[in-house]
Amino acid sequence: MCLPNYPALVLNADFQPVRIHPLSTWGFERTMGAVMRDRVTVLEEYDAELRSANFTYRPPSVVALKRYVRVPERVAFNRLNIFLRDDFTCQYCGQRFGTRDLTFDHVIPRAKGGKNSIENVVAACMPCNSRKGDRLIKPMREPRQPDPREMARKAHKVKGELHSDWLSYLYWSGVLEQDD
């Protein structure tokens, strides 16, 4: 059986997104399970009716947890987050690339005691990374721990449009900036 694709934005009990990057969403099945177990409050619904043998309902598009969940404030250290933070731009030559043409480079090489952390790794194209090798070369921008809200804005630009029901909750929480 093929279930419909109705993702729901998941807000914490304080009506802030549980996670900003990646944005906290649940699939249809998980959302409906939480609704049936009374673990969430439905705030918005899709403009669609689904029917089962026993009842008719509208799938939730925004839900809020009934119990507050504490979440980490730091952005995870992974390839996509490095590329997003650096705007998919080689930090040595300044050229923009797709993910297939980018790699990451340790600013202070591991052979010279550099750490494998988000504060020591930058996006680099393959030619620049090869040319740099294990030498110390200053990147265009020093690597830093990114702000989760900044990463959410960058991810939104790359990912595309968000569901219209979600926008007011994301603006209200400061995840998105309103255009004036």
Image: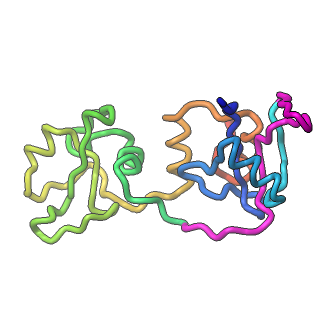
Please identify the quadrant where the C terminus is shown.
top right
Give how far across and how far down residue 153 sits, in percent. Answer: 55, 44
Q: 19 or 67, which lies in front?
A: 67
Residue that protrudes farthest toward the right in the picture:
55
Instruction: From the viewer's side, name the closer residue of 1 and 108.
Output: 1
Q: Residue at x 80, y 38 (%)?
A: 59
Residue 128, position as x, y percentages in the image: 14, 41
Q: Is residue 16 left or right of residue 116?
A: right
Hey, which quadrant is residue 90 in on the image? top left
Q: Is residue 180 visible?
A: no
Colour style of the rendered protein structure: rainbow
- Residue 58 % position (x, y): 85, 36
- Snapshot quadrant of residue 13: bottom right
Placement of the N terminus among the 4 image quadrants: top right
Please give the range of residues in magenta: 47-72
- 129 sits to left or right of 60: left
Q: Which residue is found at the position 65% from the left and 35% from the top?
A: 162
Q: Quadrant of residue 8?
A: top right
| 56 is within the stretch colored magenta | yes
For the stretch drawn in magenta, the main secondary structure is loop
Q: How many marks?
A: 0
Viewer-nearest residue: 94 or 132: 132
Magenta region includes residue 138: no
Q: Residue at x 28, y 34 (%)?
A: 100
